[in-house]
Image (spheres, grey):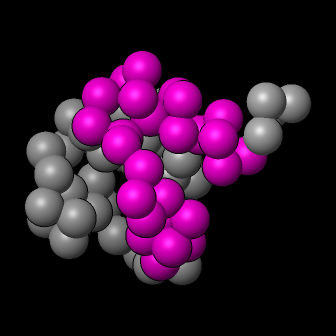
Amino acid sequence: MLTQDDVASLLNIHRTQVSILRQVGILKAIKTGRNYMFSQETIKDFQHDYAGYNVSNAENARQSYLAVNGNHE
């Protein structure tokens, strides 16, 4: 399992962006007390499913989520 900081480092993004991706539903997490943990499989799925998509901010992440998962979500 990876922490938010681990994921940020792995993806070369700020930890705030990890939170945005989690809140939008792109990154699935397990809440452990006050923190969230992410599986390595979740990160691999993200890298595969969202390759080529712009997830640089909350609005772009939402649009990308809808494109990947369909508008029925």
What range of the chain is rendered magenta? Answer: 43-69
| Image quarter of the C terminus | top right
Percent of width and height locating residue 31: 52, 47
Q: Residue at x 53, y 39 (%)?
A: 64
Percent of width and height locating residue 25: 58, 40
Q: Is residue 49 magenta?
A: yes
Is residue 13 visible from the viewing direction of this image? yes
Q: Which one is in front, 6 or 34?
A: 6
Q: Which one is in front, 66 or 4?
A: 66
| Image quarter of the N terminus | bottom left
Numbered marks: total: 0
Q: Is residue 68 above or below residue 40?
A: above
Q: Quadrant of residue 2?
A: bottom left
Q: Residue at x 52, y 28 (%)?
A: 62
Q: Quadrant of residue 45?
A: bottom right
Q: Quadrant of residue 37?
A: bottom left
Percent of width and height locating residue 47: 43, 70
Q: Is residue 8 above or below residue 26?
A: below
Is residue 33 visible from the viewing direction of this image? no
Give the main secondary structure, helix, strand or loop, of the magenta stretch: helix
Q: Residue at x 54, y 29 (%)?
A: 63
Residue that sits furthest to the front in the current view: 52
Q: Which one is in front, 25 or 55?
A: 55
Q: Residue at x 27, y 37 (%)?
A: 56
Q: Is residue 25 magenta?
A: no
Residue that sits furthest to the right in the current view: 72
Percent of width and height locating residue 12: 13, 61
In-image side of 41 versus 13 (left or right): right
In-image side of 62 versus 67 (left or right): left
